[in-house]
Image (cartoon, helix red, strand yellow):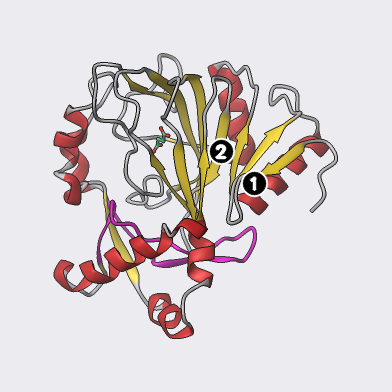
Amino acid sequence: MSYDRIEVTPLAGALGAEIRGVDLRRLDNQTWSEVHEAFLEFHVLAIRDQELSPDDIMTTGRRFGEPNFYPFVTGMDGYPYIFEVIKEPSETRNFGGGWHSDTTYLPQPPLATLLYALETPARGGDTLYCNTAAAYDALSDTMKDLLGRLKGVNSAGLKHSGGRSAHHAAIGGMKIQGADTADSYEAVHPVVRTCPDTGRKSLYVSRAHTIRFEGMTEDESRPLIEWLQAHQIRPEFTCRVHWEPGTLTVWDNRCTQHNAVNDYNGQRRVMRRLTVGPQTPI
Ligand code: SIN
């Protein structure tokens, strides 16, 4: 794909691109079409130098799909779908630390997440991404065949990191809600999902959310879930986004996972987050 209206600089071999030369508040059809093409090609776009109000974030998000409601953090006043991801200098735990795709425990998880940086640490606070379609492609045919017949049971309970209530209790700067209801959020999805836009298959399983395979016990499922998690995050499937205030990163939850690196204790980081495009994984 060639891009005439936007500057596209790949971040790594597997996925990710930095985008410059675009003002998301003033997108004509051709420019939007290039941004969308780049989203499907690179899966993670770090769009630099934006000045976005909450209304602008909503308008940009709606280009990808309808907004998704996030159950566990209260939205901003007047913007129930946008919430702030905040880590204060006094805090040691961050939101989104650990590899995952967003809200896979919903029946229709969001195809895209938009994260807009307001305040970033002088050092650290990057986000890692991995390409789960490339990870799928690298599997043997026999493993692909096996996984193609499995479904994953995905829970919001964060059972492998001490439970959501304990996890969120340590994140003081954010408006957490409903963590005690997390165990009631469960959804069964194919372990290999196909992107309806590209036809490409990707792994859709994570240590954070997938508690077992349908028809199997947790004990039986765990070793393969662990192996798949380790496989997906091999360095050659990853990229890293370094944030600056004004960066809007949008990622494709259908074929990526992300992990917010918690290496900036003593510094403040403030982002605004919106998920969009509820879609039943197929
Ligand atoms: C998230 O997991 O949505 C947060 C990612 C980040 O703060 O970098």
Marks 2/1: CA–CA distance: 8 Å
Outermost residue on the right side: it is 4
The quadrant in which residue 246 appears is top right
Residue behind mark 2 = 250
Looking at the rendering, the quadrant in which ligand 1 lies is: top left
Residue type for callout 1: Phe
Along the horizontal axis of the image, is 125 left or right of 207? Answer: right
State yes or no: Cβ of the residue under disc 2 lies below 8 Å from any atom of ligand 1: no
Graded by Cα atoms within 10 Å as few (under 14), some (14 to 19) or many (20 or more), the crowding at tag 1 reads: many
Q: Position of residue 219 (x, y in %)?
A: 14, 69
Label 2 is placed on what type of residue?
A: Val
Q: In this image, 37 relative to 193: left or right? A: right
Q: Is residue 208 magenta?
A: yes
Contact between marks 2 and 1 (CB within 8 A): the answer is yes
The answer to whether residue 216 is visible is yes
Residue at 35% over, 22% down = 86
Q: Quick check: 244 above or below 9?
A: above
The residue positioned 46% from the left and 21% from the top of the image is: 120
Coordinates of residue 248 in the picture (x, y in percent): 57, 29
